[in-house]
Image: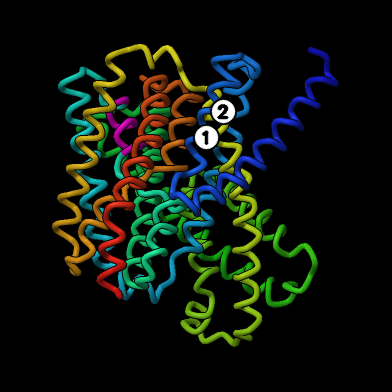
Amino acid sequence: MSYALSYISIFFITAGLIFIGFFGEMFFRKTGFSEYIFLILIGILFGPIFGIFPYSIIVEILPYLSQLTLAMIMLELGMSFMIDDLLKEGGSAAIRTLIYVSLSILLTFIIFKYLFGWSNYSSFFLSTVIGGETTTAVVPYLAKSLKAEDFFTNITLESSLNSVILIVLFTFGLNSFLQSIPFSINGFENIMSSLVSQISIGIVIGFIAALVWIEFARHFWTEEFFYIATIGYTLALYAFLSFINGSAILGVLTFGIVLMNNKTFLNLFRANANEQILDLQVNYIKMFQKEITFFLRTYFFFFIGLVFFVDKLFSLLTYVYLGILLVILLSSRYIAVKLSTKNKKYEKAYYVMMAQGLTPAVLASLALYYSLPMAHYIVTIASLIIITTNIITVIGWAKVSPSLLQQKE
């Protein structure tokens, strides 16, 4: 293949992916089926089946795309947390999230370690990749169709909280693995010491960085490229915290939370602020950031398909793993919903809201790049879990939502 053909092919594929993402989003809004499924399948066709994109090249690109996507995920999650919503609906959302994530991680870890003989680290990485995410791209949109503000706010908070928890757990586990800290009782003290240190550094610097940027924004928010400058500032913050061994993900998350709730924090410090200007800043940043996240998300699911291990589809063990994990997720979800739901009429609706998305895809790609134990299976299982949980959510929502809409009427 010549160089000219190479870049022409890449341009055509990129254009195709953008259109698939665009029309896939429209298809999703009409049917509830996410474009994630199509993008993964197209990636499988272009990668392992037809070999258009060599695996060796993709696996080198993937970590950079993963870290960039991770930074944008955390910014988006941070900007989804409104303090007023947290005070109103955060309690039940947090309880449901903690139960769902904790149970699914614990059960996955125990079963894969003691039943299938996986190592401590490989069991932990698998459990944190697929352990109880509800994707922010699918679940809140379906919830919005119900036109019940409390339900929508609650499920949106859960979607953000569980992604944050899984990303934090996975990255701290990854750091411990790369530092060769034993995953045992003896190594627990070192892991916890590193965790507390990184969390503290990340949150403090993220908070200070947000206040600095809010002050900067008050003077320069009318500049034409202010929004892209905000993205640049976010990436600089992420890189700086990674360099000094602070928690980059929590730093960016904190930055997003403070940015979104700037008036609350400025009032806390009794700082004068033009509320109209602050609202405009946040709204424009969110709009621009959504466009970037859309592009990264579209490309990322395609890349996950490119590194999919087709041979695992012909292994019975893959389907045994998948079946057990689905049972774990469904049972953990059921228990979490039963123990946390105040308004019982929404129980079934909360129960079916278990579609997974970008978080397990990104974490699985990092497992592959760092050659973590059982990474090939983790990528394959994560892809299949994303597909199956999206199908379960769409079918479940189609059965549950009509009765809820009738009750509202």
Q: Is residue 195 visible?
A: no
Q: Magenta residues: mostly which secondary structure?
A: helix
What residue did someone put label 1 on? 38
Judge by depth and name the residue closer to the eye, 179 or 110.
110
Q: Is residue 6 above or below residue 171?
A: above
Q: Position of residue 195 (x, y in %)?
A: 36, 45
Q: Position of residue 113 (x, y in %)?
A: 20, 24
Residue at (66% x, 55% y) in the render = 231
Amino acid carrying mark 2 in the image: Ile
Tell me where the magenta segment starts and ends, as one range. Answer: 122-130
Task: Classify 10 Å Cα crowding around label 1: few (below 14), some (14-19), many (20 and above).
Answer: some
Residue at (68% x, 72% y) in the render = 217
Amino acid carrying mark 1 in the image: Phe
Residue at (51% x, 28% y) in the render = 41
Identify the image quadrant of the C terminus: bottom left
Q: CA distance from mark 2 to mark 1?
A: 6 Å
- In the structure shown, which secondary structural element does the residue marked by tag 2 occupy? helix
